[in-house]
Image: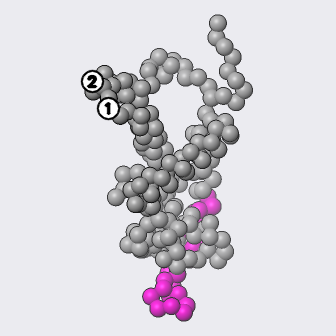
Amino acid sequence: MAREPEPGAPAEPTGAAADAAYPVEEIAAAWQRERPGTPVSSIGIVTPIWRLAKLLGDDRRRVLNGAGVDVATLDLLSVLRRGGPPYTLSTRELSRRSLLTAGAISQRVARAEREGLVARRPGGGRPRTVLVELTPAGHDLVESTVDQVLGREAELIQALTPGQQEQLAGLLRILLQDVQRRLGDDRISQVGEE
């Protein structure tokens, strides 16, 4: 007799998905069979994170392609938009908030400027300071795109209850911060970027 799922619990897989074993468990079991003693505890965490990153990254790119913007440009525009009025930040601050190098920010700004989404101007007071301002076209693009992206991603994590989402977010924060500390690398880029 099938038991009733708990309210708010994720739906059980059906069809072929229910029949297939969870591949991560198969991978860990195969390593244990072939090389007893091999440390496999990370496989159940790292492998799904890599797979999720790939799936979520690909889906985000599809949504953004439909909106006519690329991931890097939307990231730049979003940092400016989240900064609040007057939607202007120095390239140094953009680099800090984006966790990207000055060179990467410079490339993103140049591309967005060519598309009329941002404007650059000299910063007042300090030599070599460059300010980047969101243009009306850039503002409109962020406004029309951010709900598409975040709404889609909210749909994709609906299998988790709000409590589970909060718990997972906290655990991922702890894991990310510790891995960054261990590797001495606090940069964050898109999956597959150098």
What residue is shown with label 2?
Answer: 34
Callout 1: 10 Å neighbours few (<14), some, many (20+)? few
Which residue appears at 41% of the width and 37% of the height? 42
Residue farthest front in this picture: 37
Horizontal and vertical percent position of residue 78: 57, 64
Indicate whether residue 119 is drawn in magenta: no
Which residue appears at 54% of the width and 50% of the height? 174
Q: Amino acid at mark 1?
A: Thr
The residue closer to the viewer here, 91 or 24, is 24
> Left of 103 or right of it: where is 149?
right
Horizontal and vertical percent position of residue 58: 44, 45
Residues at circles 2 and 1 in contact by the CB criterion of under 8 Å: yes
> Where 180 falls versus 107 (above or below)?
above
Which residue appears at 45% of the width and 25% of the height? 22
Work out which quarter of the rendered image holds the C terminus and state it. Answer: bottom left
> Where 120 falls versus 104 (above or below)?
below
Disc 2 on helix, strand or loop? helix
| Residue 38 tag number | 1
Q: Amino acid at mark 2?
A: Glu
Residue farthest right in this picture: 7
Indicate whether residue 141 is drawn in magenta: yes
Callout 2: 10 Å neighbours few (<14), some, many (20+)? few
Disc 2 and disc 1: Cα gap in Å? Answer: 9 Å
Disc 1 on helix, strand or loop? loop
| Residue 107 tag number | none
Disc 2 or disc 1, which is closer to the eye?
Answer: 1
- Provide the residue span drawn in magenta: 120-144
The residue closer to the viewer here, 51 or 139, is 51
Which residue appears at 45% of the width and 61% of the height? 186
The residue closer to the viewer here, 106 or 63, is 106
